[in-house]
Image (spheres, rainbow, N blue to C red):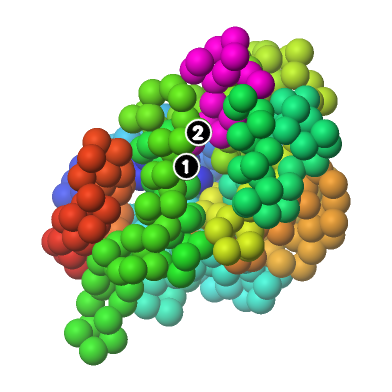
Amino acid sequence: MKRKLIAAVGVAAMMTGIAACGGDSSDNASKDPKDRTESLTVWLMVDAQSTWPELVKDVNAQFNKKYPKVKVNVQYQQWADKAKKLDTSLGGDKFPDVVELGNTETMQYILNGALAEIDPKKYDNSDTWIKGLKDTCTYEGKQFCVPYYAGARVAVYNKDMLKKGTGSDALPQTEDEMLAALDKVSAEYTKKDKRFSSLYLPGRYWYAAMSYVAGYGGSIAEYDEGAKEWKGNLSSPESQKGIEHFVNLVKKYNKADQTKDEQDHANVMANEKAALIYGNGWEAGSVVDGANNGNPKLEGKIGTAGMPGPNGKALPSFIGGSDLAVTAKSKVTDLGEEWVSLFTSEKSQEVLTAKNILPNNEKQLEPLKSKPETAAVANAVPDAWFTPIAPGWTSIEKEEVLENMLLEILKGTSVADATKKADDKVNELINK
């Protein structure tokens, strides 16, 4: 779900450790649950601790009702250093049995043999798991993790500012209408602040750029069945149209530093330097969260809506979210599977949906599509796109290819030349 893909740190050590210490719970698994005395270590991201701690508590209670002597040790991790800590732990003898992974992280660990294979039939609503999440857990027809929750990007906008352009606080439904409104917003607010951006799109925001690529029918790469390999597709006419469209929006509407990424764009809106950003649904809350550099004065003034895209359609969103996996080194894989099953059950997912968090399945997602607070992001999920599900698309190098391509175009390199160079680099890296 988070921006940076995991770096390939300590892979050799991790692989050695996994090969030397495979999970083996067969003897203990045959015992009466009340006689099990092992411990289960679970790594969850801090989001669970801050936003749904009652779910963690309830699931642990359910688990301990069946396994009263098993100690469940939930440890909360920060996104910034989780990957490095996990790589280190998997190379040693103290590691989690269950781990939460951002959906852009899973393939690295699947390919390294770090995750145990799971049986989807053991988990609620697995037949309607959101495809974009399920795909991030699947390799060569096998499943290695369980979808946890979903996310998508939407338009996050300042209602009062938008009224200056439309007379209404509802975002226009077509891109032409939206941009016409933003032109009026720009004319009003740049009188006082030349660095005000009616639409703040950072130039290195590759997630947004690839959404426009998807909007025109392009993609980062395509699998060539004949050659049995992935091939870069950024230089295709469709992809080039999307990239050019994105860059033109950046150049016209971003009056700040166009070479930045999107990491602080919610803060830019909180400082009232932008009328609209394209961000994760949860970033609307970040804009007004005073505890995290937000602006509480904007409470009630920030809206979300589906982002209008080219050709009269909604802009396709990147599918974000988290997955849960049992590590291959765990000696209590059966306990890990059961804990994950409880934590992702239909009952547990109801706790998330009550907090406007998107569930892992289409069945429970459906009601959120018509709920005002979640309609924008819930409707963006089913048709969302994802990066290539390819063994080579796992390291930070791939992200840098896209960012560098966008920067080159912003600095004057032609779209044709920049995308050709990017395709060459993709082809070099993706089939490793």
Q: Position of residue 385 (x, y in %)?
A: 50, 62
Query: Does the CB distance between marks 1 and 2 fall below 8 Å?
Result: yes
Q: Which range of residues does the magenta coloring cover?
A: 188-201
187 in the magenta segment: no
- The residue most toward the top is 192
Q: Position of residue 312 (x, y in %)?
A: 63, 62
Element class at badge 2: helix
Q: Is residue 72 left or right of residue 404?
A: right
- The residue closer to the viewer here, 38 or 321, is 321
Q: Residue at x 48, y 55 (%)?
A: 211
Q: Position of residue 201 (x, y in %)?
A: 48, 36
User: How many C-alpha atoms fall within 10 Å of the one at disc 1: few (<14), some, or many (≥20)?
Assistant: some
Count of residue discs: 2
Q: Residue at x 68, y 48 (%)?
A: 177
Q: Residue at x 68, y 15 (%)?
A: 295
Marks 1/2: CA distance? 6 Å
Q: Is residue 199 something that shows in the picture?
A: yes
Q: Is residue 56 something that shows in the picture?
A: no
Q: Residue at x 74, y 14 (%)?
A: 296
In the rendered image, which quarter is residue 267 located in? Answer: top right
If the image is split into quadrants, where does the C terminus sit?
bottom left
Q: Position of residue 283 (x, y in %)?
A: 62, 33
Q: Is residue 322 left or right of residue 169?
A: left
- The residue closer to the viewer here, 6 or 11, is 6
- The residue closer to the viewer here, 290 or 17, is 290
Return the residue at label 2. 253
Q: Amino acid at mark 2?
A: Tyr
The kind of secondary structure the magenta stretch mainly shows is loop
Circle on res. 249: 1
Q: Amino acid at mark 1?
A: Leu
Element class at badge 1: helix
